């Protein structure tokens, strides 16, 4: 299959740690999952170190940094503690997300437009240290323009609402959300931002997102780790890779 403009697949391994932490054992090991993901064709590994440490732990970040060959995308909230950690580890990328203690997962995008000055100061040392700073935002024009103004290298567009609509909404709602994501991706690229996307992506809903030409990377976690129970992690990643390639073929 000839694939034009190949899309990178970042595998989020947070929920390997969720499973491990459920028993307080040393297994399953997130580093082992990352190495397996690499062998199965992943292009990057994402790990989210949450303030409450509900899944990935500080020691996992150290182990991933030391142990993987793929680029590491360190996902975190824009706090002083995380900046310190990122500046010590110097991962390939730092993806900034909003965090609420009571949420089950990252519910919305970062409000860059409201927090512009603080975020501009926050990302400057990270970029200077060589990390590609990515901002996880909705497809809203104000947020995209603010991300470009403060000098982020990347925006990751939140596909959670699209995924929810795909599961439960009408066709018209799905199409409207896709259209907004397409417009957001085109605007972001026109402003010089690299465009990623993720959240809630599955075998069923990934194709229209993967077909958006401006998007260069998808980050997928929960579904792949769940599917690994049935297919094996390597097979689940290979199937996601195949669907992404088909969408670009
Ligand atoms: N991208 C970002 C910024 C995220 O916060 C998450 C969830 O941790 C994902 C992608 C992956 O989402 P999911 O686990 O639903 O595939």
Image: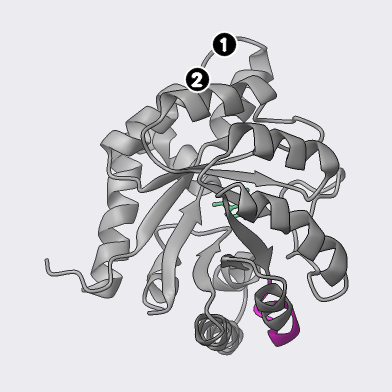
Q: Position of residue 215 (x, y in %)?
A: 44, 72
Q: Which residue is mark 2?
A: 29
The relative height of residue 210 versus residue 52 in the rendered view (above or below) is: below
Magenta stretch, residue numbers:
138-143
Q: Is residue 230 left or right of residue 183?
A: left
Q: Is residue 46 left or right of residue 112?
A: left
- Which residue is depicted at the point 56% across and 81% down? 188
| SS class, disc 1 | loop
Q: Quadrant of residue 71?
A: top left
Q: Position of residue 132 (x, y in %)?
A: 55, 55
Q: Which residue is mark 1?
A: 26
User: Residue pushed farthest top?
Assistant: 25
Say if residue 168 shows up in the picture: yes
Query: Would you say the beta carbon of the disc 2 residue lies within 8 angstroms of ligand 1?
Result: no
Count of number-bearing discs: 2
Q: CA distance from mark 1 to mark 2?
A: 6 Å
| SS class, disc 2 | loop
């Amino acid at each position: 299959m000839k694939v034009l403009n190949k899309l990178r697949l970042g595998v989020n391994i947070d929920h390997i740690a969720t499973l491990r932490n459920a028993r307080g054992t040393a297994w399953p090991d997130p580093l082992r999952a990352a190495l397996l993901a690499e062998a199965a064709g992943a292009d990057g590994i994402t790990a989210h170190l949450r303030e409450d440490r509900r899944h990935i732990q500080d020691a996992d970040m150290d182990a991933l940094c030391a142990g993987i060959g793929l680029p590491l995308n360190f996902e975190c909230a824009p706090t002083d503690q995380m900046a310190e950690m990122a500046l010590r580890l110097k991962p390939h990328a730092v993806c900034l997300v909003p965090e609420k203690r009571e949420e089950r997962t990252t519910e919305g995008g970062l409000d860059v437009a409201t927090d512009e000055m603080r975020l501009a100061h926050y990302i400057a040392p990270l970029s200077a240290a060589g990390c590609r700073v990515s901002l996880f935002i909705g497809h809203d024009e104000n947020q995209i323009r603010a991300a470009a103004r403060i000098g982020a290298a990347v925006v990751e567009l939140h596909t959670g609402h699209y995924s929810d609509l795909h599961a439960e909404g009408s066709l018209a709602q799905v199409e409207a959300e896709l259209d907004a994501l397409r417009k957001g991706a085109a605007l972001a690229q026109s402003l010089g931002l690299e465009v990623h996307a993720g959240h809630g992506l599955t075998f069923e809903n990934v194709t229209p997102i993967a077909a958006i030409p401006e998007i260069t990377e998808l980050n997928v976690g929960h579904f792949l780790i769940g599917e690994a129970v049935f297919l094996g992690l390597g097979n689940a990643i290979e199937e996601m890779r195949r669907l992404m390639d088909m969408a670009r073929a």
